[in-house]
Image (tube, rainbow, N blue to C red):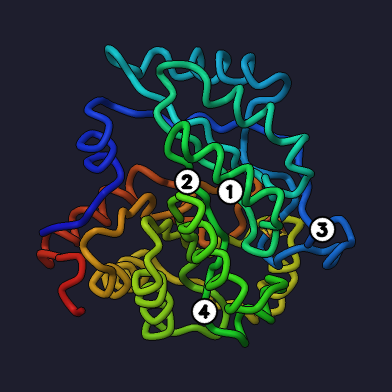
C-alpha cells in the first residue's frame, strides 16, 4: 500500500512534526457578501471553521497553547488562514497579517485558503513576495471539475478560472492545495475520479478530499429534506476515495481523507461524525486492498 500522506510528507520535508494552527484574517466571501451572491455555496453555513480571533501573534500563541499537551519536542507550525476567502481584501491590509504569522522561527510555512477568483494583481504580488520568505501554500476550493455540478452547488466561477489561478500561483512560487468534495448531488464515482485526475494533471501539489456534509441552515439542508441528495454510506465513500487516489500522481500530497464537520450542526451522513472510526475503517480498507496512489495512471 502507498499513499503520500501529509504526516509523512511534513516529516520528510521539514524534519520534524508540524502542526497547523487555524487563524482568522477577518475576510468575508464574495459569494456571501452580495458581490457574487448572498447565499454562498449550497453546503456552506457561513459560520466558518473554528479559528482563533484577535491580533495574529496572540492567535498563534493561543493556538499553540491549545495543542501544547499533544506536541512533542521541537515542533514546527503552519499558520492556516482557513475560513472564508482569505485573499478577499486589499494586499496592504493582508500583508502585515501574513508577515506576522510567518515571522516566528518555528513557523515553517504559511497556508492561505481562498477562492481562485480572488487573486488579483496586488494579491499575486504579495504572495510572490511572501513565498520568497517561507513556503506559501494556497488552498483552492474547486470541489468538482463538472460544470453542471459547479452550477448546482453555486460555486460561482468556471473551471477556467481555477486553471488560470493554478498557473499564476505556480508562477509566483506558491504551492497549490485543491479541495474536492465527494458525494456531490448528481456525481457518480467515475465523475469524482475525473476531478481528482484533473487536479493531479494540472500540477496541484496537494489535495484535500472531503465528504459532502449536510449542515443545518444551509441550502443543501432544504435539498436533502426534499430527498434530492443521496447520502453515501461509509464503504461507498471509501470506494470513491480509492478511485480518486488511484488516479492521483504519486507526488501529490493527500492532506485529508475526510472532512471535519461540526457534530452539533451535522445532519447527514451521521456516520461521518465518528471521525476516529471513519479514519480507522478508511485505513483498514486501504490496507486490505493494497491501495497504491497513482496505480491507474
Ligand atoms: S467560497 Fe467558501 S466561504 Fe464562500 S460561500 Fe463557498 S464555501 Fe462558503
- The image quadrant where one finds the C terminus is bottom left
Q: Earlier in the sequence, mark 4 or mark 1?
A: 1
According to the image, label 4 marks what residue?
145
Q: Which residue is mark 2?
A: 137
Q: Residue drawn at (42%, 46%), measured in percent from left and top? A: 274
CA distance separating discs 3 and 4: 22 Å
- Asked if the residues shown at circle 3 and circle 4 are in contact, with their CB atoms under 8 angstroms apart, the answer is no
Q: CA distance from mark 4 to mark 1?
A: 18 Å
The residue carrying mark 3 is 32
Badge number at residue 113: 1
Q: Quadrant of ligand 1?
A: bottom right
Could you tell me which secondary element the residue under label 3 belongs to? loop
Asked if the beta carbon under badge 1 is closer than 8 A to the nearest atom of ligand 1, the reply is no
Determine crowd level at label 3: few under 14, some 14-19, many 20+ residues with C-alpha closer than 10 A: some
Pointer 2 with pointer 3, Cβ within 8 A = no
Check disc 4 and report its element: helix, strand or loop: loop
Q: Nearer the viewer, residue 7 or 122?
A: 122
Which numbered disc flags the more N-terminal residue, 3 or 1?
Answer: 3
Q: Is residue 279 left or right of residue 264?
A: left
Amino acid at each position: 500500500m502507498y499513499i503520500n500522506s501529509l504526516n509523512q510528507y511534513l516529516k520528510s520535508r521539514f524534519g520534524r512534526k508540524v502542526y497547523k494552527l487555524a487563524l482568522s484574517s477577518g475576510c468575508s466571501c464574495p459569494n456571501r457578501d452580495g458581490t457574487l451572491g448572498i447565499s454562498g455555496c449550497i453546503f456552506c453555513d457561513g459560520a466558518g471553521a473554528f479559528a482563533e480571533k484577535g491580533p495574529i501573534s496572540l492567535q498563534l500563541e493561543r493556538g499553540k497553547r491549545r495543542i501544547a499537551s499533544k506536541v512533542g519536542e521541537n515542533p514546527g507550525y503552519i499558520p492556516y488562514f482557513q475560513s472564508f476567502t482569505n485573499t478577499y481584501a486589499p494586499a496592504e491590509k493582508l500583508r502585515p497579517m501574513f508577515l506576522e504569522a510567518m515571522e516566528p522561527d518555528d513557523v515553517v510555512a504559511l497556508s492561505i485558503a481562498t477562492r481562485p477568483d480572488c487573486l488579483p494583481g496586488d494579491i499575486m504580488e504579495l504572495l510572490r513576495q511572501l513565498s520568497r520568505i517561507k513556503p506559501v501554500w494556497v488552498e483552492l476550493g474547486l470541489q468538482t471539475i463538472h460544470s453542471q455540478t459547479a452550477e448546482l452547488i453555486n460555486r460561482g466561477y468556471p473551471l477556467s478560472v481555477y486553471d488560470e489561478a493554478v498557473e499564476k500561483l505556480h508562477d509566483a512560487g506558491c504551492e497549490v492545495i485543491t479541495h474536492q468534495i465527494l458525494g456531490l448531488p448528481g456525481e457518480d464515482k467515475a465523475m469524482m475520479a475525473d476531478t481528482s485526475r484533473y487536479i493531479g494533471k494540472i500540477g496541484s501539489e496537494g489535495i484535500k478530499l472531503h465528504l459532502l456534509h449536510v449542515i443545518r441552515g444551509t441550502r443543501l439542508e432544504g435539498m436533502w429534506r426534499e430527498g434530492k441528495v443521496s447520502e453515501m454510506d461509509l464503504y461507498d465513500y471509501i470506494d470513491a476515495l480509492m478511485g480518486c487516489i488511484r488516479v492521483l500522481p504519486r507526488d501529490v500530497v493527500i492532506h485529508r481523507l475526510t472532512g471535519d464537520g461540526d457534530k452539533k450542526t451535522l445532519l447527514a451522513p451521521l456516520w461521518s461524525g465518528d471521525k476516529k472510526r471513519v479514519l480507522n475503517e478508511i485505513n483498514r480498507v486501504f490496507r486490505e486492498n493494497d491501495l497504491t496512489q497513482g496505480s491507474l495512471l
